[in-house]
Amino acid sequence: MASWLIGLSLRLKVALLGAAGAAVALLYLWGRWKIAAAAATSAKAKAEALQATHDLEKRIAERRLELGVKQRKVREQLAKRSERDAFEDQGWGP
């Protein structure tokens, strides 16, 4: 192997070294691109999960508000019934 390298001309050695350097640079850039693509995919998945969580929290808050309004109405109706029940069977009213 060493004798084969010694027998090559300097011009060919420089060309091979340049080609090897270019190949290493391209492999490095390809690896960085793959890592960046994986990070972007992960970030997109996290953003979608966060948006889904936000939407769920919003629906829960709206539902709690609706239930609070319904509970208030029911409590008001129960309070009115208990007021009416206090005067029933006492002979008051029609």
Image (spheres, rainbow, N blue to C red):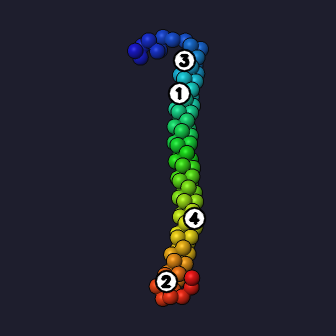
Above or below, 37 relative to 71: above
Mark-to-mark CA distance, 4 and 1: 57 Å
Which residue corresponds to the image point at 57% horizontal and 50% vertical from the top-left?
51
Above or below, 66 relative to 1: below
Q: Which residue is mark 3?
A: 16
Q: Position of residue 45 (x, y in %)?
A: 52, 43
Q: Position of residue 64 (x, y in %)?
A: 53, 63
Name the element at disc 3: helix
Classed neighbour count for the residue bearing mark 2: other residues with Cα under 10 Å, few (<14), some (14–19), many (≥20): few
Q: Is tag 2's residue or tag 4's residue first in the polypeptide sequence?
A: 4
Which residue corresponds to the image point at 40% horizontal and 15% vertical from the top-left?
1
Name the element at disc 2: loop
Classed neighbour count for the residue bearing mark 4: other residues with Cα under 10 Å, few (<14), some (14–19), many (≥20): few
Q: Nearer the viewer, residue 52 or 9?
A: 52
Q: Nearer the viewer, residue 52 or 39?
A: 52
Q: Which residue is mark 2?
A: 88
Q: Residue furthest left?
A: 1
Residue 48 visible in rendering? yes
Q: How many tags in the picture?
A: 4
